[in-house]
């Protein structure tokens, strides 16, 4: 009998769960709202409901499930499966998530940080397959990272390692206040929302250049997203192009230091912002090579993630591979 793995990706707005086959295929999936604003008990019920839905729809006996992997935003401790206090899951404080899921379903359950889990998934099934020393980055609402050394995740002393998005690259940037409380974290300078804010600041000055971005949102600057900027850049808009190049430069400055520290075999970049494509990646590579002392930096591939839309599900499932 084939053994499946259930992967559950718990986010601030939605829970995506899926069944992964032994050969790394997505057999079925379900997406439910997290309902995080209603508190811990309600959002936990949504986690349970997503698993129950998959088991019921696919008529799977618990004996056919190798394990349930759950990835969630940190901070958390993967060794004991406790989620400490994630900012985008209100009310979640010291939640023994692995224990609660295991007790509910009678199936072995493990919990991992979402970026860490994505890193493993890219190593097992994605762009980093065949590599053992990997630096994974996700650039979207925030910037998360996962470090793999010798084919194994590096968790640090208490499971808190890998928070690369909160490495400071410009501590006196007046606009760089990060959600973590520090100033100048790479997340506060190059994540999607902060990149949008940077472009909006340029549009708000009296001498602002004309931009397609304004037309695309009918003059409502609050509607600007990274998708808007990417679309305008694809049409040759000067401001949008400059904004994306600035983001690539900032990411490259930071990645140069990460290469100095880790000397990885490969860097994989995922998350919604990575969908911009060559324009962003070309700038990242150019900037990275200028900001590292590693003489072999040009031999380190910097590539887009392969597992895009379902990386959370695959990441959670990879805990049991």
Image (tube, rainbow, N blue to C red):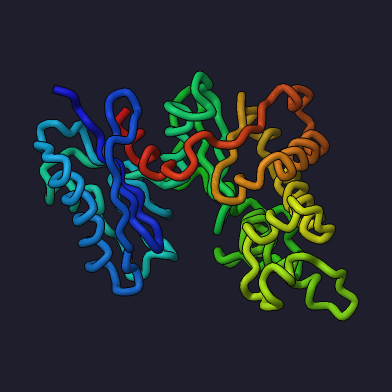
Which quarter of the image is occupied by the N terminus? top left
Q: Residue furthest bottom?
A: 206
Q: Residue at x 52, y 43 (%)?
A: 162
Answer with left or right where residue 111 lies relative to residue 185: left
Q: Position of residue 174 (x, y in %)?
A: 75, 70
Q: Position of residue 191 (x, y in %)?
A: 63, 56
Tell me, yes or no, if residue 158 can be seen here: no
Q: Residue furthest top?
A: 130
Image vertical order of residue 97 relative to residue 292, above or below: below
Image vertical order of residue 97 relative to residue 162, above or below: below
Q: Residue at x 75, y 36 (%)?
A: 285
Answer with left or right where residue 59 lies relative to residue 183: left
Image vertical order of residue 273 relative to residue 214, above or below: above
Q: Position of residue 26 (x, y in %)?
A: 33, 35
Q: Residue furthest right?
A: 207
Quadrant of residue 186 within the rendered picture: bottom right
Quadrant of residue 305 within the rendered picture: top right
Q: Nearer the viewer, residue 65 or 208?
A: 208
Q: Position of residue 267 (x, y in %)?
A: 61, 33
Answer with left or right where residue 81 lies relative to residue 200: left
Image vertical order of residue 161 relative to residue 299, above or below: below
Answer with left or right where residue 310 lies relative to residue 51: right
Tell me, yes or no, if residue 132 can be seen here: yes
Which quarter of the image is occupied by the C terminus? top left
Q: Nearer the viewer, residue 80 or 19?
A: 19
Q: Residue at x 43, y 27 (%)?
A: 125
Quadrant of residue 135 within the rendered picture: top right
Give the tally of numbered discs. 0
Q: Residue at x 80, y 70 (%)?
A: 202
């Amino acid at each position: 009998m084939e053994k499946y793995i259930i992967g559950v990706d718990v986010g601030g707005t939605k829970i995506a769960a899926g069944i992964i086959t032994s050969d790394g295929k997505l057999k079925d999936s379900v997406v439910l709202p997290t309902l995080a604003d209603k508190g811990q008990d309600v959002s936990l019920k949504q986690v349970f409901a997503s698993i129950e839905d998959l088991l019921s729809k696919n008529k799977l006996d618990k004996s056919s499930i190798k394990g349930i992997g759950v990835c969630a935003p940190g901070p958390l401790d993967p060794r004991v499966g406790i989620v400490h206090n994630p900012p985008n899951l209100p009310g979640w404080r010291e939640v023994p998530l692995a224990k609660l899921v295991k007790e509910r379903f009678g199936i072995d359950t493990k919990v991992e940080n979402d970026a860490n889990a994505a890193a493993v998934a890219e190593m097992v099934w994605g762009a980093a397959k065949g590599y053992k020393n990997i630096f994974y980055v996700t650039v979207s609402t925030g910037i998360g990272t996962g470090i793999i050394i010798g084919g194994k995740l590096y968790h640090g002393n208490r499971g808190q390692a890998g928070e690369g998005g909160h490495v400071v690259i410009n501590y006196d940037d007046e606009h760089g206040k990060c959600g973590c409380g520090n100033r100048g974290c790479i997340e506060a300078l190059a994540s999607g929302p902060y990149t949008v804010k940077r472009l909006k600041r340029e549009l708000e000055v009296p001498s602002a250049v004309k931009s397609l971005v304004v037309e695309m949102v009918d003059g409502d600057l609050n509607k600007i997203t990274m998708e808007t900027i990417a679309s305008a850049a694809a049409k040759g808009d000067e401001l949008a192009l400059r904004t994306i190049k600035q983001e690539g430069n900032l990411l490259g400055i930071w990645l140069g230091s990460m290469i100095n520290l880790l000397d990885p075999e490969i860097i994989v970049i995922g998350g919604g912002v990575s969908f911009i494509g060559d324009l962003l990646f070309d700038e990242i590579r150019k900037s990275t090579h200028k900001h590292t002392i590693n003489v072999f930096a040009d031999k380190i591939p910097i590539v887009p993630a392969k597992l895009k839309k379902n990386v959370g599900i695959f990441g959670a499932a990879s805990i049991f591979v």
